[in-house]
């Protein structure tokens, strides 16, 4: 029931934006469509004792001047080695994540879009107790789990027949504790992405 309500709310918001932008869209020139595009984004991050590497390839089709539909994959690796201080023990971890999803982008304005993306991710994690000061490390353990997500948000982009560049902010609307987009308190983390795409097949 909650999922249906979420979909209805997103659908209503999308229609509202489209209606308000109707006069603006009518003045936009039609694009000579290159309907199939490939692209994605790269994630590089880290902090004290941690590193994050990710890749999100995607392929999509431009349906018309207002709608894109596509599919994406999610590859992510994270390593964490805590800095041990004051003689306190720590736990290092390695995680690998593989996911896939489908998305719809709605362009009610020339430069702004709404995005809805159901996604499923499978995660493999390994933890190792390092002991005190890195000595006498304890046993290691591994866990595996999967989780569904429903990403939704807004973005800004430049879109033409030659490709697209974009910046988006989304959140996971579902409350699955195993989702990679929610923290240990099951609060939604913002998903910030920037990427590009270029045509692979032209419409003739």
Image: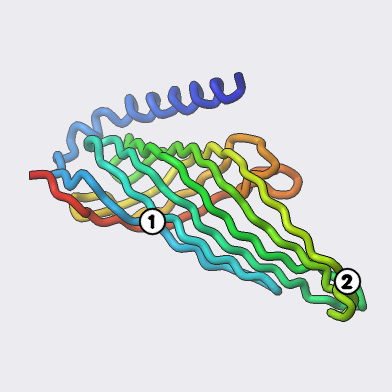
Q: Residue 89 carries which label?
A: 2
Decide if residue 147 is on the left or right side of residue 56.
right
As rendered, which of 15 and 5 lies closer to the eye?
A: 5
Q: Where is residue 127 in the image (x, y as percent from the top left)?
A: 75, 63
Residue shown at the point (22%, 35%) measured from the top left: 64
For the N terminus, the quadrant is: top right
Q: Name the residue under label 1.
A: 40
As rendered, which of 24 and 164 lies closer to the eye?
A: 164
Q: Position of residue 203 (x, y in %)?
A: 12, 44
Residue shown at the point (86%, 70%) measured from the top left: 138
Residue 27 falls in image quadrant: top left
Q: How many marks?
A: 2
Residue 97 falls in image quadrant: bottom right
Q: Which mark is residue 101?
A: none
Local crowd size for mark 1, using a 10 Å CA cut-off: few (<14), some (14–19), many (≥20): many
The residue sitting at the top extreme is 1
């Amino acid at each position: 029931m909650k999922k249906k309500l979420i979909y209805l709310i997103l659908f209503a918001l999308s229609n509202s934006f489209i209606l308000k932008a109707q006069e603006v869209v009518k003045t936009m020139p039609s694009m000579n469509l290159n309907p199939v595009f490939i692209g994605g984004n790269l994630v590089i991050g880290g902090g004290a004792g941690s590193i994050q590497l990710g890749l999100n390839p995607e392929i999509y089709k431009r349906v018309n001047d207002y709608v894109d539909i596509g599919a994406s994959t999610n590859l992510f690796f994270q390593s964490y080695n805590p800095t041990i201080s004051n003689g306190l023990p720590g736990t290092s971890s390695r995680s690998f994540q593989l996911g896939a999803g489908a998305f719809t982008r709605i362009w009610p304005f020339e430069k702004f879009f709404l995005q809805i993306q159901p996604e499923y991710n499978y995660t493999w994690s390994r933890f190792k107790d390092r002991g005190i000061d890195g000595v006498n490390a304890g046993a290691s353990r591994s866990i595996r789990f999967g989780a569904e997500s429903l990403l939704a948000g807004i973005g800004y982009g430049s879109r033409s027949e030659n490709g697209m560049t974009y910046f988006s902010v989304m959140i996971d609307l579902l409350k699955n504790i195993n989702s990679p987009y929610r923290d240990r308190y099951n609060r939604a983390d913002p998903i910030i992405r920037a990427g590009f795409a270029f045509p692979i097949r032209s419409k003739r």
